[in-house]
Image: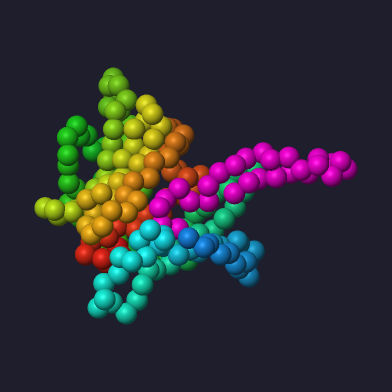
């Protein structure tokens, strides 16, 4: 996605910003619509051509669509957020505050195949910034899909190499982000699909 402006009366267009619409692996052929209240909403196909053959013969469906996102510009950059209609679908809220940890932890109540999560990380008082943080989804004794962030490198990484794929496909995606607000406020958006025995999750 490029942000382009026209110099007044000159007929010259100048590129101001160049950014990806989605930094994930599975987001193809996005389309937008204009809602009656003036919002520009985008939806895409959660699949990629490298994984098109990963389909269970017993399933009568293939792939799925992304959650609809509202698009807007701020300071010349593209931002995205889930449409407000999704707020009515949220249930069973679980909150944790001021959780201190240094090793792997699991928090009660945060589980399931569908999770809407907001997370704020900061070093403990008087401590240095952490080297790496990772979230593991759909994890059992054998499989997991991980999202990790290294603030000193400003690298956000999605890793699906242990997610249950049965053939070698593109498993990882890395992106440089602003370490102060990685993926925050819709400036960077990632849409990965995790696979477990050919099923999308």
Q: How is the image coloured?
A: rainbow
Q: Judge left or right: residue 34 versus residue 24.
A: right
125 in relation to 147, above or below:
above
Give how far across and how far down residue 25 sits, in percent. Answer: 40, 52
Along the line of sight, the residue nearer the viewer: 138 or 198: 198
Quarter of the image with the C terminus in it = bottom left
Q: Furthest residue to the right?
A: 9
Horizontally, residue 188 falls left or right of residue 3, namely: left
As drawn, the residue found furthest toward the top would be 126
Q: Is residue 199 left or right of residue 4?
A: left
Identify which residue is drawn at 58% across, 64% down: 32
Tell me the residue at 81%/42% (across/down): 12
Q: Please tell me in which quadrant of the rendered image residue 47 appears.
A: bottom left
Which region shows up in magenta? Answer: 1-27
Residue at 47%, 45% in the rendered image: 188
- Foreground residue among 96 and 180: 180
Q: Seen from this angle, which residue lies furthest left?
A: 141
Residue 72: percent from left, percent from top: 59, 52
Snapshot quadrant of residue 113: bottom left
- Whether residue 152 is visible here, answered yes or no, is yes
Taking the image as drawn, is residue 117 in sight? no
Asked if the stretch drawn in magenta spans residue 192, the answer is: no
Residue 146 location (% of width, % of height): 27, 47
Query: At 37% from the left edge and 68% from the top edge, which residue is drawn?
Result: 63
Residue 36, position in %: x, y?
A: 63, 70
Seen from the viewer's position, the closer of residues 107 and 67 is 67
């Amino acid at each position: 996605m490029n942000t382009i402006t026209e110099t007044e009366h000159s007929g010259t267009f100048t590129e101001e910003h160049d950014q990806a619409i989605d930094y994930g692996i599975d987001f193809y052929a996005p389309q937008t619509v204009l809602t009656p209240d003036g919002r520009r909403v985008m939806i895409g196909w959660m699949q990629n051509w490298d994984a098109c053959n990963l389909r269970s013969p017993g399933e009568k469906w293939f792939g799925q669509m992304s959650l609809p996102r509202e698009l807007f510009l701020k300071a010349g950059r593209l931002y995205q957020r889930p449409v407000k209609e999704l707020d009515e679908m949220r249930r069973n809220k679980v909150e944790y505050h001021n959780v201190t940890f240094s090793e792997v932890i699991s928090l009660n109540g945060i589980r399931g195949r569908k999770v809407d999560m907001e997370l704020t990380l900061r070093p403990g008082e008087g401590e240095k910034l952490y080297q790496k943080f990772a979230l593991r989804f759909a994890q059992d004794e054998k499989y997991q899909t991980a999202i990790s962030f290294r603030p000193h490198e400003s690298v956000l990484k999605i890793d699906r190499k242990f997610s249950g794929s049965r053939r070698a496909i593109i498993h990882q995606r890395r992106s440089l982000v602003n370490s102060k607000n990685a993926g925050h406020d819709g400036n960077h958006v990632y849409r990965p699909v995790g696979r477990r025995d050919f099923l999308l999750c």
